[in-house]
Amino acid sequence: MEKIKVYLLRVMFFGIFLSLIPQGATLVGAAKVDCSRVSNTTTDLPRTASIGTNPAGTGAHSIAASLAAVASKATSIAAKVQPYNGPNAWMPLLQNGELEFGIMNILDAHMAQTGTGNYAKPSPGVRVVSGGVFPFTIGLLVRDKSDIKDLRDIKGKRLAWDYGGHAINMTWQLAMMEAVGVKPSDVIQVRVSNLNDGVRGVPEGKIDVAMTGIGIGVVEEANAMEPIRFPSMPNTDAAKALLARYGASIVRSDTATGIKGDTYVVGYPLHLVSSITVNERTIYTLVKAWWDNMGDLQTKHPLLKRWTKETQAITNFTVPYHPGAVKFYKEVGIWSEAHEARLKQICQ
């Protein structure tokens, strides 16, 4: 209980800080961003490379598995997936050079790099490799037969809570709750260790509501146990402004398990990140392989249909891109003056 109180205070203060940022703005200026040069100046390619992810069944794990398969086939680097409860668990390994890559969302990347929000200690070496999947969508999951028709109906219900090594789930959940006018004290908090446990708890009848990605394996698993659905987020200016402070937006969901009719959900970029301990040649080689084999990559999982050439170099990044990635994106003509201006803006 004490751990949860400390966590909620940390998120609350981060949320208060975010509320001071102009509506519609991103996280630039929220904390000092480290823009140091790559510390690994070698030109050797590693024999292996690991990608840190969430547990099997999540979107991050599926994306990483697909990236690893293409990288291993198209280059001399044997890439593999390394699952953890979430980025909070694998971030120290990325910072120390024990892990080469990781899958995480735009807000988590900024908090990890700057040591804010869910991260008590900064990991200044984090760098974006790819803007990644956009939009990666999330929502609040309930049983289809639940009497929760509007998300304001979650008051008094049992919500998955804490999420252990993947603390960003709580940040997104609290943001969605705020958008529908529900406070933490309005719900019954049921602690879970990770996203999968929360999702499975819904069809098992242990939990009424859980935050999750849409179109991922564990949702399909839950729906096979008992039909589920995602109540719609409010598509209002107020909700849009609130989510924009977290680097996210309100979007209409594509057809997916649990989506009943027109349903609005939360969308944001899901990055591939690395660190300054990985040399430029390695990043360049892998980014080029994924770019050249994008058609193959997009057939491996439905989420990767949103891994397009247009989403690889985004202009609202909040953590610097790795120089190895920038070199390639310049060569193919998608790194522009707008990207350079953004880099200068966040590196002030």
Image: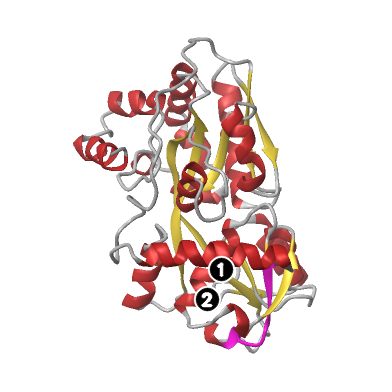
- Reply yes or no: does residue 160 show up in magenta: yes
Instruction: Tell whether 139 sits left or right of 244.
Output: right
**For the point 48% across and 76% down, which residue is it?**
178
The quadrant of the picture occupied by the N terminus is bottom right
The residue lying furthest to the left in this view is 337
Q: Secondary structure at mark 1?
A: helix
Residue beneath disc 1:
173
Instruction: Tell whether 224 sits left or right of 168.
Output: right
Quarter of the rendering containing residue 213: bottom right
Judge by depth and name the residue closer to the eye, 325 or 72. 325
Judge by depth and name the residue closer to the eye, 265 or 17. 17
Q: Position of residue 8 (x, y in %)?
A: 59, 67
How far separated are the C-alphas under marks 2 and 1?
6 Å
Above or below: residue 155 compared with residue 67 = below
Q: Position of residue 172 (x, y in %)?
A: 53, 64
Judge by depth and name the residue closer to the eye, 49 or 247. 247
Above or below: residue 114 compared with residue 217 = above
Q: Position of residue 94 (x, y in %)?
A: 59, 33
Which colouring convention does the figure follow? secondary structure
Instruction: Tell whether 3 sits left or right of 150.
Output: right
For label 2, the crowd category at 10 Å Cα-Cα, with few meaning under 14, some 14 to 19 and many 20 or more, is: many
Answer yes or no: is residue 73 visible: yes
In the rendered structure, find residue 22 and report the number of the disc placed on it. none
Answer yes or no: is residue 171 visible: no
- Reply yes or no: does residue 326 show up in magenta: no
What's under tag 2, amino acid-wise?
A: Met
For label 1, the crowd category at 10 Å Cα-Cα, with few meaning under 14, some 14 to 19 and many 20 or more, is: many
Residue beneath disc 2:
177
Q: Are marks 2 and 1 in contact (CB under 8 Å)?
A: yes
Start-end of magenta stretch: 153-161
